[in-house]
Image (cartoon, coloured by chain):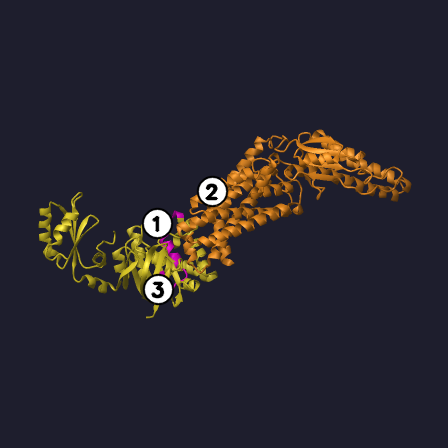
Amino acid sequence: MKKILLIGWKDLILAFRDRAALILMLVAPFALTLGLGFVTGRFSGSDSGGLSSIPVVLVDRDGGQLGNALVDLFQSSDLATLVAPTILDDPAQALREVDKDRAAAAVIIPAGFTASIIPVPGSATTGQVVHIALYANPTRQTSAGVIKAILDGFLSRVEVGRVGGQVAVQQLVSHGLIGAEDAAQVGGEIGMRQAQAGESTAITLKGALDSEAAVQFDVLAYMAPGMALMFLMFTVSNGGRTLLAERAQGTLPRLLVSPTAASQVLGGKVLGVYLTGVAQMLILIVASSLLFQLSWGNPLAVLVLVLAAVFGAVGWGMLVTSLAKTPGQVSTVGSAVMLIFGILGGSFFSLDAMPHWFALISKITPNAWGIEGFTTLGLGGGLAEVLGPVIALLVMGVALFTLAALIFNRRGVAQQ
Amino acid sequence: MPAILEVQNLVKKYGDFAAVKRISFDIKEGESFSLLGPNGAGKTTTISVLSTLYAPTEGDATVGGHSVSKEPMAVRQLIGVVPQDLAIYDDLTARENLSFWGQMYGLSGKALKARIVEVLEQIGLSDKANNRVKTYSGGMKRRVNIGVGLLHKPHLLFMDEPTVGIDPQSRRAILDSVKELNKQGMTVLYTTHYMEEAQELSDRVGIIDHGELIALGTQKELTRQVGENDTLILRVGEGEDAEALAAAVRALPGVLQANVTDGAVTLITPEAEEVLAPVVTKANESGVKIRAVEIQEPNLEAVFLHLTGRALRD
């Protein structure tokens, strides 16, 4: 294990001493993110930023104060550029709109939603608990994520209002300012006022898990991961290239005649590529956080997603390397893979705008899974919400590593 | 002295092409042994198999009693390898290179640090140890390349043409260091296509050509194969018909052999000075102008010529 770490560490040092590689690893993704930020108006105060006019279908079967408030929120001027709501009466028709890919999501507000939270006048208790249904379009995950974040934000404020009303009423009753018989009516009014007070900040999307931490949807939260993941593919193919370059320059054969097993040498090389990829992603994340004030989301979840994304990407890098015969071939094919995966994986544009088949094909790329995960985190999701992409990336990595190892084994590391 | 390396009927094939053809030899502990042969003779392939990089196709070899095909890890503990190409990292310093390679050979801690200081001293790069290798001259890089092979004090050191493509001063330094290492007791297997290096460094020489070991012995034993014969080299002008001259002088009394190598006519003769006059006469008769004449005492070049009909440089 020590030798694997030594080889990996050596490769990490060499990667960060290669100026040409550093430009493509760090400067290029940063510059492209910056450029796209300017193009989309991120730095000029425009809120149009990439995602706009997200089609969403609303069905309000509640008709009460809270149901109306939610519909009003989606129709508010603050969200006018971000969402394009359509009001329907029939939930089945709303679902069909999503199924036919005409909407990113459908929000079904059930009957009794308001009563389940605010006691009706003259009653001390609320009605039966009901749930708002969100029907998300799987091919428009980013847009559906935005709708979910808006919904989470609204529900979060409703919850704040409900709890705030309860606490206020308890205080009023205990101090003898109101009678117990008036408690239900007063509580309802306070809660309603607090919930409605939040409407003026509708453009601020709040995460369901952390109602205090407002998450501003930022176009860079989509672009920065896209660029970072695209250039991660350069890093992993360049790392794979060094395996063949070491063979050509004689250091690989020299390693293989030292008391080091071929599996240790290969393991060390893979570790070096992996460490370089992780370092690249973390540097880009920290730098963009500091310079663009970009929030990537829950730090632990971001780290887990980075580790998984690099694992999947390194799998592709090793497969390309195992199939190539010269360092030049790895560079050529690696560059092509970087660009194709960048386009296919959604690094340049949202996959939500693409046909269903395109979104399906994109799943072979670590870019698509990574962007999906980072967007979820950027919108306030946590580790649990990105488990899907994380598992997909790990499975991808294991499958590709296995394939690459079989090819290496057949060809021989030294004589490939 | 017991043999530290024993090679038995070693064959290495790449597909149908046999790069090494059933060679056998041994090297005693403390011996300095050279494999001499032209480019493409099979020297590097032989070293590659003996250092366990490639498995032999047939036959086997043992280092310190360990089979290169069956116990490669045990063999690797005993050997050091200085490859023909520079196998070091340009973007690391000399010290970082030595540290990395030392750890790959199991050195660590104070022992590693002390050994790095010793080796840097030995290769004369103590004052530039913290500069990146890419800033070094070719000769300095070669010295680092050699230093890496010495770090773990191997019992048997393989040196594969370590002086190729470097300046005379660095070449001299490398040859002196090889002699010094051997004097200190290290067994050396040195491959070269320079006859002078093999003559200067080796206790015994194996001459290899087209993958076959065609001669083996001390220099005296080998030169005895060509007897006391001299080598007479006739350099002719550009455009002159060297083949015609070789054919003309081949029939002269006292000329044992006449071949054209590198555009010059090379004669093997018991007494070069005696045949010189008739050779010049023949040249005049043939209309071939001789530009220079060189007489060589018996040496390994002559042995190779005698055995193959070609010069080492061919």
Answer yes or no: do the residues labelled 1 and 2 have beta carbons within 8 Å? no
Identify the residue under disc 1: B138
Q: Name the mark nearer the viewer: 1 or 2.
A: 2
Asked if both marks, 3 and 1, belong to the same chain, the answer given is: yes
Q: Nearer the viewer, residue A178 or A282?
A: A282
Q: Are marks 2 and 3 on the same chain?
A: no
Please give the label number shown on residue A333: 2
Q: Which of marks 2 and 3 is in front?
A: 2
Q: Distance between the residues labelled 3 and 1?
A: 25 Å
Q: Residue at x 17, y 62 (%)?
A: B227
Residue A396 rendering spot, x and y as whole percentages: 57, 48
Q: Which residue is drawn at 80% across and 33% down?
A: A63
Image quarter of the N terminus of chain B: bottom left
Secondary element type, mark 2: helix
CA gap, disc 1 to disc 2? 33 Å
Magenta-tinted stretch: B134-157
Chain letter of disc 1 in the image = B
| Label 3: which secondary element | loop
| Chain A drawing hue | orange
B173 or A136: which is nearer to us?
Answer: A136
- Percent of width and height locating residue B199: 25, 60
Between B88 and B124, the one nearer to me in the picture? B88
Subunit under mark 3: B
Point out the tag, 3 or 1, that comes first from the N-terminus. Answer: 1
Relative horizontal placement of residue A380, taking residue B179 as reference (left or right)? right
The residue under label 3 is which amino acid type? Met
Tell me, yes or no, if residue A291 can be seen here: no
Mark 3 Cα-neighbour bin, 10 Å: few <14, some 14–19, many ≥20: many
Check the rendered structure and report the hue given to chain B: yellow
Circle 3 sits on which residue? B186
